[in-house]
Image (cartoon, grey):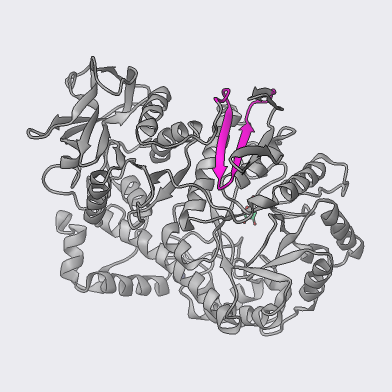
Amino acid sequence: MEHTQLLHGGDYNPEQWLDRPDILEQDLQLMKKAHVNVVTLGVFSWSLLEPEEGVYHLDWLADIIHRLYQHGIHTILATPSAARPAWMAKKYPEVRRVRPDRVRELYRRRQNYCYSSPLFREKVRAVDEQLARRFGQDPAVILWHISNEMGGDCHCPLCQAEFRRWLQHRYGSLEALNKAWNSRFWSHDFSDWEEIESPAPQGEDCLQGLTLDWKRFVSDRHIDFFRFERDVIRAIVPQAKFTANLMYRFHDIDYHDLARELDVVSWDNYPTWHKATETVEQTALDTAMMHDLFYSLKGKPFLMMESSPSFTNWQPVSKQKRPGVAMLSALQAVAHGSDSVCYFQWRASRGGEEKFHGAVIGHDGREDARPFRETAQVGAALEQLAPATGTSRPRQAAIVHDWPNMWALEGSAGPRNAGLGYWKELACHYNALARAGITVDFVGQDSSLEGYGLVVVPMLYLLREEFAQKLCDFARQGGTVVVSEWTGVVDESDLCWLGDTPHGLTRLLGLRRTEIDGMYDGEFRRCLPVEGAVPALPATRAGVLCEVAALEESDPAQVLLTYTEDYFAGCPAVAVHRFGQGRAYYLASRFEPKFYDALYASLTREAGLQPASPWPLPKGVLATRRDGLLFLQNCNDSPVSVSGVELPGYGTAVWADRDGSLQRLL
Ligand code: GLA
Ligand code: ZN
């Protein structure tokens, strides 16, 4: 997929309007006015593509693709596998998913097929081949979009059998499996593969090795299904490029694994703007964290495949984006590495689940309505930002975010079963770095750490031996590492590491964990800086989990902050340790935001990381870099001025580096 312009458009579902040629004609006219250059077609078109088993109707789709193309609009073509027709679900029950309680679903909703069913795969193959043969060589089609928002799990007999095969492949023997799951506890040793079942509410739900492996297996199944569909098309269209649309803080699939199979990552971005409990800047940071994650999955530009120009209808309360926020949110995606701004959906449905979901064109069909006007403005701005297309981002800091770790951490009983706040922990570090204008990537334990100056390791409970080694090597060669509480506790089977912890990091950190104490919500322990400690950090409060650590006898860490309350008063709350050419920071607990701001201000300076903006920024203004470009975004609803430039409320300004100076692009 080659493009020299940022893509602008989105999900187009004309199958709802085939009896209204006047509306289809208006769509085309309005797309031109909104500077749309791409649409995604076919995501949920199966019942029209194959109304009866084996009878395919593709002409309507060909007509639409070609009419759009004549007007300069390309197509991202989706496979229809996410939602199967009713006839199939009725005739072939095995395509319907079985819930964790072992009840097979009736025909309902979408994204709930059995990914193991050979029959379902055959049906998908047949329709995908039709699409590939008809449109594979079509210059209008620039990218293939496999399925839609893959996720969930199926507990049917076919999936149980696949799970057992997967376990046999992973462990080789029941002996090895029993050992990895420590199943002797409560006498749960398995003596036959057939005894093993997926977790269930009325069945096994606390053998944590089993639960973790089930999550790995489900993730692998989705990826296998993706690969299957991709390869069906690739066999007919060898040059085809593929994406899948990923989701916010998504649990079910290890996106590091999935990304290896994709040509381009895309994701669906639906922040809850204007929450009662959050400023626009906070929502922007939360969203930025996701954009950065999706950029990092392949270390290259991604696509924002869906977003709403106005509001969604599935959040507890549907709030309209205030004037200007659609632009802020669209350009934020670009600032963080997206090569597109796309919406769901182009025209609002008349009926069904999503009739009140914000669309570019509403039920009134008016082009003077705010969502349309703002979308057209975004389209014009994206044309001005064409130089951003395909540009990469500097490598500065990395935060470790690993799916198996998240699964194991959240699946374990203790030391806090409510409100562990894994994502909050990530946000503590991310927000401070992002506010300081540092480019942040998210890496997994298999990722390379090359090129980064700083690696943050938040709550890496499941820490693999090789990764601990990688962190030590990184610091030895001059990198800075930050390790938070509850790191290095278990191995990849969720078996507790024996001996001193954080496993593999005690020499790096110059200390070891001796205890961990859970705090109730709202319960804190005061921490004060040690006099004369460098860097000087502010007093703060520790909450959620308080680790107690003891310094190593030889080559101990230097303590920066100590707890001043409870039986662990005087123990290190924050410490730093020189290691080789670099250093490692240890944070024993979760602290207040101002602490992280101070910590990262100091250690990014120390690590020589350049902030994105050459100018000091007013509160609520965020700065981001893509190579050769600087973006400043004002998250306040009132104007601010930066280096003589007036940024309106929710405004964005973009500069290009030209011959060593910054020239205004937008
Ligand atoms: C997801 C789906 C779309 C639509 C939107 C609504 O992202 O992919 O089909 O349901 O949510 O927000
Ligand atoms: Zn199944």
Q: How many marks?
A: 0
Question: Is 452 positioned to the left or the right of 512 in the image?
Answer: right
From the image, which quarter does the N terminus lie in? bottom right
Q: Is residue 240 one of those drawn in magenta?
A: no
| In the depicted structure, whether residue 367 falls above or below residue 85 | above
Task: Identify the residue at image location x=70%, y=78%.
Answer: 135
Any part of residue 353 in sight: yes
Farthest left residue in view: 553
Question: Is 215 positioned to the left or the right of 17 in the image?
Answer: left
Q: Nearer the viewer, residue 589 or 192?
A: 589
The image quadrant of residue 82 is bottom right
Farthest front residue in view: 659
Q: Position of residue 269 (x, y in %)?
A: 60, 48
Task: Identify the residue at image location x=53%, y=68%.
Answer: 113
| In the depicted structure, whether residue 437 falls above or below residue 216 | above
Farthest top residue in view: 531
| In the depicted structure, whether residue 476 falls above or below residue 74 | above
Q: Nearer the viewer, residue 632 or 581?
A: 581
Q: Position of residue 530 (x, y in %)?
A: 23, 17
The image quadrant of residue 137 is bottom right
From the image, which quarter does the C terminus lie in? top right
Question: Is 64 positioned to the left or the right of 77 in the image?
Answer: right
Q: Position of residue 264 (x, y in %)?
A: 55, 62
Any part of residue 189 in sight: no
Task: Identify the residue at image location x=31%, y=50%.
Answer: 408
Q: Is residue 626 one of those drawn in magenta?
A: yes
View quadrant of ligand 1? bottom right
Give the residues drawn in magenta, as a range.
616-639
Q: Position of residue 451 (x, y in %)?
A: 38, 50
Q: Nearer the viewer, residue 468 or 412?
A: 468
Question: Is 202 positioned to the left or the right of 659 in the image?
Answer: left
